[in-house]
Image (cartoon, rainbow, N blue to C red):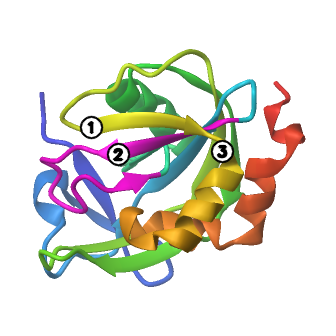
Amino acid sequence: MSAEEVVLLDEAHRPIGTAPKAGVHTTDTPLHLAVSCYVLDDDGRLLLTRRALAKKTWPGVWTNSFCGHPGPGEGFVEAIARRAGQELGFEVTAMTEVLPDFRYRAVDASGIVENEFCPVYLARATGRPRPLPAEVAEVAWIAPEELFAAAEAAPFLLSPWLLEQIADDRLRGALTSRAALRP
């Protein structure tokens, strides 16, 4: 099996090459392509995950349902389906792009930089997660409003990309809308 590759981008978010995922996140991380997903169940609860303690960046921090890096030539929906299976051991459906233009840069306490153009999607769960321990330490199903309250009360417990994403009214509306639950 070959090493997973990430797609490197220029400032206009156009592909300019690839790099091995294992070495791309450093103190000088180049801009690259990612995707972020928030998963709701049939009751409108949101799946939050706590990053594994062995993760290179933000270990043990609570974050959105999952993230990933589309491979060269891989679409966002395909990458989401692949990462849901790899990271959480379940399938998702009804993938809908909510923040098509999300980009962020953040520096972990260790000095490692995240520098990603990372469209944000909403999806529906088809079952219960069986997380891969190397990726996810814990999961929790919560009401979206509980996430918003936690972000205000204790932002240091949450990933920086989650905080930026949920500050956008488009995502807040999608997470709290019953319309998001329709198949």
Task: Tell me which amino acid carries mark 2.
Answer: Arg
Residue under label 3? 122
Query: Which mark lies nearer to you, 3 or 1?
Result: 1
At horizontal 28% and vertical 65% (from top left) the residue drawn is 17
Front one among 149 and 126: 149
In the rendered image of this protein, does residue 37 appear above or below residue 102? Answer: above
At horizontal 42% and vertical 57% (from top left) the residue drawn is 34
Look at the numbered disc 3 and give the secondary structure of its residue.
Answer: strand
Task: Tell me which amino acid carries mark 1.
Answer: Ala
Residue 47 rendering spot, x and y as whole percentages:
54, 38
- Label 3, residues with CA under 10 Å away: few <14, some 14-19, many ≥20: many
At horizontal 18% and vertical 66% (from top left) the residue drawn is 25
- Label 2, residues with CA under 10 Å away: few <14, some 14-19, many ≥20: many
Query: Which mark lies nearer to you, 3 or 2?
Result: 2
Residue 38 rendering spot, x and y as whole percentages:
58, 45
Numbered label attached to residue 151 = none
Residue 18 rendering spot, x and y as whole percentages:
25, 60
- Marks 2 and 1, Cα distance to the nearest angstrom? 5 Å
Q: Earlier in the sequence, mark 3 or mark 1?
A: 3
- Marks 3 and 1, Cα distance to the nearest angstrom? 22 Å
Look at the numbered disc 1 and give the secondary structure of its residue.
Answer: strand
Q: Earlier in the sequence, mark 3 or mark 2?
A: 2
- Label 1, residues with CA under 10 Å away: few <14, some 14-19, many ≥20: some
Q: Which residues are magenta?
A: 45-63
- Quarter of the picture holding the N terminus: top left
Residue under label 2? 50
Residue under label 1? 137
165 to the left or right of 56: right
In the image, farthest residue toward the right: 179
In the rendered image of this protein, does residue 40 appear above or below residue 67? Answer: above
